[in-house]
Amino acid sequence: MPEKSFFQKVYEVVAQIPEGKVSTYGAIAKYISSANASRMVGWALNKADTLEVPAHRVVNRIGMLSGKYHFDGLTLMQQLLENEGVRVIDNQVQDFENVFWDPSKELI
């Protein structure tokens, strides 16, 4: 069986982020054993079909909506998160510590 590509690994992790939670590019990169590849995680998400991969649930290390420019309309990422109960003010996820989902602690 061929090894999964970096992008496939990213998509599999992101698909498991629960509604109402967010993760970070760095946490995902670290989980897939590519700790220095957080920008590549972002690149993978830019190439994803956002309907199949919940890319809106991935933010930067301090909870900012740094990927919002890759969604249709500048407020779509925020709207999708708010629809799931995540509060966002000025492109910043509120209560970040409580809505942060760490794949290294949640996935086996």
Image: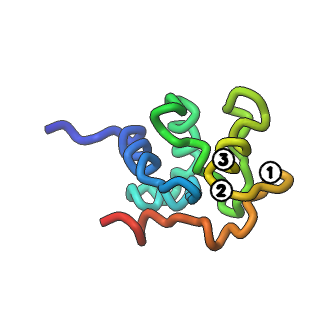
**Are the two marked residues, 3 and 2, in contact with CB atoms closer than 8 angstroms?**
yes
In percent of the image, x 56 and y 51: which residue is there?
38
Which residue, given by chain and number where applicable, does mark 1 sit on? 91
Amino acid marked by disc 3:
Asn
Amino acid marked by disc 1:
Asn
Alpha carbon distance from label 2 to label 1 = 15 Å
- The image shows residue 55, relative to residue 22, as above or below, that is above
Looking at the image, which is closer to me, 81 or 32?
Answer: 81
* Mark 1 element type: loop
Tag of residue 15: none
**Are the two marked residues, 2 and 1, in contact with CB atoms closer than 8 angstroms?**
no
Q: Position of residue 14 (x, y in %)?
A: 46, 48
In percent of the image, x 66 and y 61: which residue is there?
61
Amino acid marked by disc 2:
Gly
In percent of the image, x 72 and y 49: which residue is there?
65
Mark 3 is surrounded, within 10 Å at the Cα level, by few (under 14), some (14 to 19) or many (20 or more) other residues, namely few
Which residue, given by chain and number where applicable, does mark 2 sit on? 85
Tag of residue 83: 3
